[in-house]
Amino acid sequence: MSAVLKPKSKAIVCDGNEAAAWAVTLARVDMVAVYPITPQSSLVEYLAKFVADGRLNAEIVDVEGEHSVLSVLHGGTLAGARTYTGTCGPGLAFMFEPYLRTPGLRLPIVMSIVTRDTLTPQSVWGGHQDAMSVREVGWIQMYCETVQEVLDTTIMAYRIAEHRDVMLPVNVCHDGNYLSYGAARIELPTQEEVDAFLPPPATNWHAALDPARPMAVDPLTGGAGGAGPALFVGYRKGQCAGMQNALAVIEQAHEDWARVVGRRHAPLLESYRMEDAETALVTLGSMSGAGKDAVDAARERGERVGLIKIKTYRPFPVQAVARALAGVKAIGVVDRSVSFGWDCGPLYQDVIGALQFTARHPAAMSFIGGLAGADITTDHFERVIERIRALAKDGQAGETVWLNEKD
Amino acid sequence: MAAYNTIAFKPELCNGCNACMTACATVKTGSPDHVNSRIQIVADEAGFELAMCRQCGDPKCVSNCPAAALAKDGGNGVIEWDGAKCVNCLLCTVGCAFGGIVYNAAAGHVVKCDACGGDPACVKVCEPGALKYLTTANIYREVGDLEDLFVPGLSGCQGCNTELIMRHAMRRIGPDTVLATPPGCIPGMGSVGYNGMTGTKVPVFHPLLTNTASMLAGVKRHYKRQGREVNAVALAGDGGASDVGFQSLSGAAERGEQILFICVDNEGYMNTGMQRSSCTPFGAWTSTTPVGERGSGKTQDAKNMPVIMMMHNCEYVATASTAFMEDLYVKLDKAIDASKRGFAYLHIYSPCTTGWRFPSQENIEVARKAVETNFVMLWEFDPRDGLRLTRSLDNPQPIAEYLKALGKYRHLEPEQVDRIETTLQKNVELIRDLAEGRRPAMAGR
């Protein structure tokens, strides 16, 4: 099975969609269910090709829509399979019903969200609105900055999802257009390296369908009397505990992965030039590179600015965020999506929530950019830095700034 | 109505002694000459074959007869020959594929098995037990030995037909099964269970109402990959099959997923309070097609689910009714077998005493009337042989007999009954055409 893979890690040039397909192959996934949607389509094409070429020894189920994509994986996972799929935008919306159910069933499915802005206006381009719309469903969400991080995180996602203390599904989010189609040189780990890191899948006997061990999966639970309500609470609390346990498991997985391949990614958040910083940018996903460039330029001018890149968004690393931002005076959170109820970005909401755990409660402002495939450039970040410089002085947070409004 | 009887033959037990032919010829003609026997055991290199009347559900000899000399007895199922009407044209022999009705030179006319009035001579002398005389009661005794895979005390309504279907289907399918019961009456009565307790002895789960076939496909594919033979079975209501679950059902059928999908059709959402589904027939009262000053039941016809599934080129599709249990069991066996090769779909009609408004003790009678009026037609399909009737559509009872038995049709105006009759005729014509090859049962393959 691994004969086609060279024994030593090698460098290849590929985009984020191909990198995810390589990760799935190296993770020895048993089953993939696929349905194409822009900008994920080439990802499932790579998977189909890898199966056809005999590289990926997996059952591939070409179903009639995303609802069935995840439903097939529910069945496969309940029968003991390691499973994978990817989707985005309208596809994610269509699979919402089984998506909603996945964490409650504690199914360790890994699914890429190749992020795309949601309808309407009709749009096929990148944006985080799809992933953000499902942030409270109970899936773990990790956002990648680079093509290499897509590959590494997708492999690590299985370690995290299948961990006994977690047993929850994971979304590996990579930005539509910017990461899905942006090619980069990456290191492809060897099968031996991945095998050393990732144990074979173990059936989750919390919920499994096997005639050798009959079990009723998901009886009606709850109601107004008897054991029901307490049982329901027990399941919900257990799910929340799994989510919180994931924080340590994610850190350990990144640590172990670094030991195997010699590459280290920040597990929960990355602090970039935050030493002595007075102001800080907070970013998510592929925009972080431009943000770091802007920080470098400002530092050269003598400005004390740094950047926090959130990698793990769900569970939200509240304490790590509070610690990272405790010492600054002003924060600019740049979102690639919108919270309609609050008229700001969703990451901004989470950050100001975490700031409650700091002694000085730094001032923060919401910036929204990169909707529907728009570029967030170093110029945009310059504007953010300029605005929060003022915020640090006067503490007067203004209304949400829409970065691409006049582009 | 008496039970239907069958002389069943197991060739693997036959030793070729021919005692049956001697007994038959002696009883029927006084001479032991095998040429006069109504039962013929034919030896070939593959073993033994039986040439004898099968008392078919849809007898070709009867439909071929221009003189009405042949008729199926509705009581015992035996096809009777009337010498007074026979014109000796022998067209009946052309219709029969089983050598069950043949010209006999000594008699000067066709002869056939009449089951000796319920005590067949051939069976009595068969020492190795290759011939057995099976009655409905015998069939029940046989399946009664199979384990009931549901616990006692499922909380179905009194006289629930669906519970009967569940128990019979699962005891035949057996324990090496993963069972999906999407939301509806079936989990409602406790198949998956409540608060940690379950009503089923095999692995069972609640799919969503929408994704039964897809979840089962995932289960089955992984077991196949592991080389384990596990039946993937759905017991779904008509709503979960024909409405919101239809996309996943159609997709799984198109892909030929190796699943047995049983649609238990009680013509609506009976569990949630009797709302209409796309399987609810025209004119029927439901809680969302109520009867009032401006409403008079459902205004559209039912979706013909079994025909739609047949058009997917499934490995096997059949309709069945609990009033015809032998037929149902034969189809279950074929469906289980077909699901090892591809998608199998069984559509079983399940009159609902609560939602259709009739006394619970009349459930099987209502199921029988549905079939005898052709409102429900019993047939089966496979891609090689196309559609085949398993019960004749001839001489149906008037549809009014069925409609008046049900409270949900009590309000019907004469013009609504007319429309039901017209639609019924069209449906019968369609199935007849398919059965007789006037229309192809499917494209492709």
Image (tube, coloured by chain):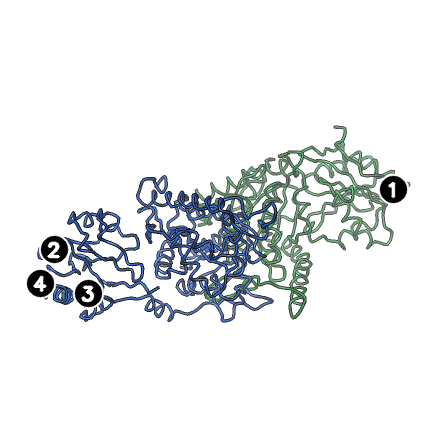
Return the x and y of residue A224 as percentages of the image width and height.
Answer: 68, 66
Q: What label sits on residue B33 in the rendered view?
A: 4
Measuring from the top left, give residue A45's x and y in whole percent: 50, 39
Q: Which of marks 1 and 2 is in front?
A: 2
Query: Which residue is under mark 2?
Result: B104
Residue labelled with disc 1: A392
* Eye-nearest disc, 2 or 4: 2
Chain of the residue on which disc 4 is drawn: B
Is residue A406 depicted above or below B28 in this figure?
above
Question: Which amino acid lies under the numbered mark 4 shown in the image of this protein?
Answer: Asp
Label 3 – label 2 distance at C-alpha:
25 Å
Q: In this view, does A62 lie above or below B336?
A: above
Question: Which type of secondary structure does the marked residue at label 2 adopt?
Answer: strand
Q: Which of A273 and A373 is in front in this view?
A: A373
Q: Is mark 3 on a helix, strand or loop?
A: loop
Structural distance between the alpha carbons of marks 1 and 3:
98 Å
Q: Chain A is drawn in which colour?
A: green
Which chain corresponds to the colour blue? B
